[in-house]
């Protein structure tokens, strides 16, 4: 009895091993680069955590299929992500964090810089993450632009490099341009400026997100649009600028402008879908979620431009040996196109659009990236329809959207002061 | 202590052969007191000492480090935000307490004096606990679609012609916060008050009636004073729960109001552990003072 069981197990393990090697061979065929596989790589488990945006189970399943090792995903909100990256280095192998979080936690020394020469598609990564410029002519937006915290001079350095080096802090994965979400059916007129958020017309029907680091940027976009404040750098305000900004919003709050504030993705969806709120800060998948309930909702492009964010994968300082090799394989696989296509079909942008294109239909690529009319119904990866024939994406093509970024999510030098002022706003 | 030999005696008679071990009185009391003392030390004294220690530490963006600074307290005690949030929190406590006490007292009075059969008393008492079978958060969140602008409450009122535009104050307001508190915590009043009322000697009420007291006089002069310990225990529950709350305030006010608990939660989220620890210490002291005052009003131990 004992013997047969042992035999059975070992046979199954053997089969599994063969399958993994086979899958690896297929995977390497797709990527088109030779990979040397240690037989025991299938035993590797990498623990990744990040925001719900890109911590998707589909990705973990595909990793198992293509690369053979196990990827454990933990999805958290951005505050918890920061907390974990800063204080629990032993709890993860790969950190999927935003660039502004990287600026905050890099100094804790829990992440290790990545060797650019081991990243196959490095040359194809869009310029935003390398030189900071989308095209050679574009100007660099305010805030914590990804390239400014994307490199360190040498492994182990705690300070960022001013230009591209061989050592990258985060490998960019996804990014997007954020703006205000509106209910066109309840507003009934065009919205073109950030200042509309505080328009008394929407009294008791506006909302802003209660995550201070991001909320303050939306506030700044609004104040600048109103013509009340001219900022030196919205991503790095002076105390005086913070005071003025918060004062304007406290006044609006006391006048009853806001219905509620939201902190998590689903709260923003519920506020919008129930009609409690008609204009608010919003994230792109939240718009999709409202739309998928059959409720009209537009991610409104505004004259002043977008507030943008970008995320990337960072490696834990504890990674070494086989696990580190597996992590590099994973990153190369991540940039090789499948994930990019998967995420772009949800409305995000991939860091290497060229490879993502291979995993999207012409119609999908045209709609999501080039801003063209859909020639067929556009569905998300889960199969629910996102756009009908003839619809175009809010804001247009990649260049139109990412070329109009006014500022990046940021951490300010006056962060502590800003958080205190933010608390005043909430308590007002 | 003097009760112990008396209770032990019948047991010894039943099993006369069993050797009776007599521990020295000193050792016995040490053994009796140590489990609780150890538990309290591990789960109360040590954590609180850690919190107090950390509240004097310094912090930056990603780290907090040993230090001895009064900065956390200095900011906390001089900031207008602290004052505002405490005023807000106290107002929630006061309102929640007044409503839960009034409703709790009425429910307990009905159960104890109007329902005559014990079976019905127990049955109705269990009915009171039914809402507790679902989670606190579910009970709270289910108010949101009900009270919303296009929610059930507004729809019914609109259709009945009682209002012309939806009532905005129903949700994401102080009204909603207090409503949720009352809904969540009334049972904490009902149980101890009911318990106190059941202990009232019925002959006292008869005596009062024989002496010509009106039903209202009986209520105010006999039942109310004798229910005070229950009322006080319930009040301690409600006051401490509301003082430390962050989630109800966040959801029901739509994040628009700040309570002390929410400020602490924010500080933790922003990695400002020392600041959060300082806030927690101040909150702890405030709650302890409040409870001390409440215990001054009624000697619970004497009246239990």
Image (cartoon, coloured by chain):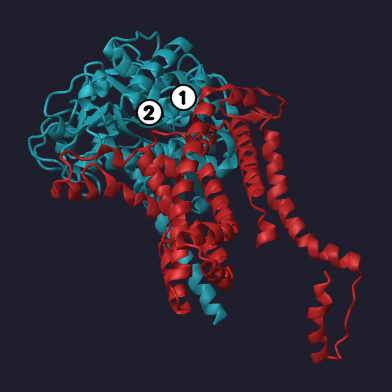
Chain colours: A cyan, B red
Q: Which tag, 2 or 1, sits closer to the chain's start?
A: 2
The x and y percentages for residue B86 are: 53, 33
Q: Nearer the viewer, mark 2 or mark 1?
A: 1
Q: Quadrant of the N terminus of chain B?
A: bottom right
Q: Secondary structure at mark 1?
A: helix
Task: Using the image, name the chain to which the residue with label 1 belongs.
Answer: A
The x and y percentages for residue B220 are: 51, 56
**Between B162 and A153, which is closer to the camera in this rendering?**
B162
**Between A402 and B73, which is closer to the camera in this rendering?**
B73
Count neighbours of disc 2 (C-alpha within 10 A) and say few if under 14, some if 14 to 19, many if 20 or more: many
Residue plotted at (41% across, 22% down): A146
Q: Quadrant of residue B26?
A: bottom right
Residue plotted at (63% across, 48% down): B297
Residue plotted at (84% across, 77% down): B5
Residue position marked by numbered label 2 in the rendering: A310
Q: Quadrant of the C terminus of chain B?
A: bottom right
Residue position marked by numbered label 1 in the rendering: A424
**Between A359 and A36, which is closer to the camera in this rendering?**
A359
When the figure is inspected, residue A246 is found, relative to residue A264, above or below; the finding is above
Count neighbours of disc 1 (C-alpha within 10 A) and say few if under 14, some if 14 to 19, many if 20 or more: many
Left or right: A247 as drawn, with respect to B278: left
Left or right: B83 as drawn, with respect to B145: right
């Amino acid at each position: 009895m004992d013997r047969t069981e042992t035999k059975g197990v070992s046979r199954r393990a053997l089969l599994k091993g063969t399958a993994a090697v086979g899958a690896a061979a297929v995977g390497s065929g797709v990527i088109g680069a030779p990979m040397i596989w240690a037989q025991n790589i299938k035993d590797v488990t990498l623990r990744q955590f990040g925001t719900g945006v890109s911590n998707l189970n589909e990705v973990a399943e595909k990793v198992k299929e293509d690369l053979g090792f196990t990827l454990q995903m933990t999805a958290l909100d951005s505050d918890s992500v920061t907390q974990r990256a800063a204080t629990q280095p032993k709890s993860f192998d790969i950190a999927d964090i935003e660039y502004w979080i990287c600026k905050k936690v890099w100094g804790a020394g829990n992440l290790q810089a990545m060797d650019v020469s081991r990243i196959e598609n490095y040359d194809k990564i869009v310029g935003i993450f390398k030189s900071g410029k989308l095209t050679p002519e574009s100007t660099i937006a305010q805030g914590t632009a990804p390239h400014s915290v994307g490199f360190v001079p040498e492994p182990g350095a705690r300070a960022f490099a001013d230009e591209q080096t061989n050592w990258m802090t985060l490998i960019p994965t996804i990014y997007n341009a954020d703006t205000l979400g509106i209910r066109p059916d309840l507003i009934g007129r065009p919205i073109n400026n950030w200042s509309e958020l505080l328009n008394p017309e929407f009294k008791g029907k506006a909302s802003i997100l209660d995550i201070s680091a991001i909320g303050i940027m939306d506030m700044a976009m609004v104040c600048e649009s109103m013509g009340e404040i001219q900022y030196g750098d919205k991503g790095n305000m002076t105390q005086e600028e913070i005071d003025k900004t918060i004062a304007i919003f406290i006044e609006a709050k006391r006048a009853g402008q806001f219905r509620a504030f939201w902190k998590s993705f689903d709260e923003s969806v519920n506020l919008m879908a129930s009609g409690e709120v008609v204009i608010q800060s919003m994230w792109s998948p939240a718009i999709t979620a409202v739309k998928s309930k059959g409720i009209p909702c537009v991610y409104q492009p505004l004259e002043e431009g977008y507030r943008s964010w970008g995320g990337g994968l960072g490696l834990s300082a504890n990674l070494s040996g086989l696990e580190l090799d597996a992590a590099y394989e994973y990153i190369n696989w991540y940039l090789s196109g499948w994930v990019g296509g998967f995420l772009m079909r949800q409305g995000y942008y991939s860091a290497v659009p060229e490879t993502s294109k291979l995993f999207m239909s012409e119609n999908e690529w045209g709609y999501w990236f080039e801003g063209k009319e859909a020639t067929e119904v556009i569905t998300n990866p889960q199969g629910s329809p996102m756009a009908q024939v003839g619809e175009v994406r809010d804001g247009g093509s990649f260049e139109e959207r990412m070329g109009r970024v006014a500022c990046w999510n940021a951490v300010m030098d006056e962060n502590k002061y800003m958080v205190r002022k933010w608390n005043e706003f909430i308590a007002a | 202590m003097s009760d112990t030999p008396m209770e032990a005696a019948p047991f010894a008679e039943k099993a006369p052969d069993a050797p009776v071990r007599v521990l020295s009185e000193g050792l016995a009391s040490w053994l009796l007191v140590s489990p609780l003392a150890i538990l309290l030390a591990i789960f109360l004294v040590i954590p609180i000492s850690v919190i107090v220690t950390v509240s004097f530490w310094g912090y930056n963006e990603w780290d907090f480090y040993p230090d001895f600074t009064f900065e956390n307290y200095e900011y906390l005690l001089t900031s207008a935000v602290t004052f505002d949030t405490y005023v807000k929190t106290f107002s929630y406590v006061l309102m929640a307490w007044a409503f839960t006490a009034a409703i709790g007292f009425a429910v307990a009075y009905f159960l104890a004096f109007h329902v005559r059969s014990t079976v019905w008393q127990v049955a109705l008492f269990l009915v009171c606990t039914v809402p507790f079978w679902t989670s606190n958060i579910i009970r709270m969140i289910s108010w949101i679609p009900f009270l919303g602008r296009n929610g059930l409450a507004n729809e019914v009122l609109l259709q009945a012609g009682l209002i012309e535009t939806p009532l905005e104050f129903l949700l994401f307001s102080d009204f909603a916060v207090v409503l949720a508190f009352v809904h969540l915590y009334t049972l904490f009043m009902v149980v101890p008050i009911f318990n106190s009322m059941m202990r009232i000697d019925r002959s006292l009420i008869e005596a009062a009636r024989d002496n010509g007291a009106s039903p209202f006089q009986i209520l105010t002069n006999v039942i109310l004073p004798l229910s005070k310990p229950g009322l006080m225990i319930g009040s301690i529950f409600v006051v401490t729960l509301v003082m430390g709350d962050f989630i109800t305030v966040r959801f029901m006010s739509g994040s628009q109001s700040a309570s002390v608990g929410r400020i602490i939660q924010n500080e933790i989220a922003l990695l400002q552990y020392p600041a959060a620890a300082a806030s927690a210490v101040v909150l702890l002291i405030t709650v302890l003072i409040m409870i001390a005052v409440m215990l001054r009003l009624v000697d619970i131990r004497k009246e239990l």
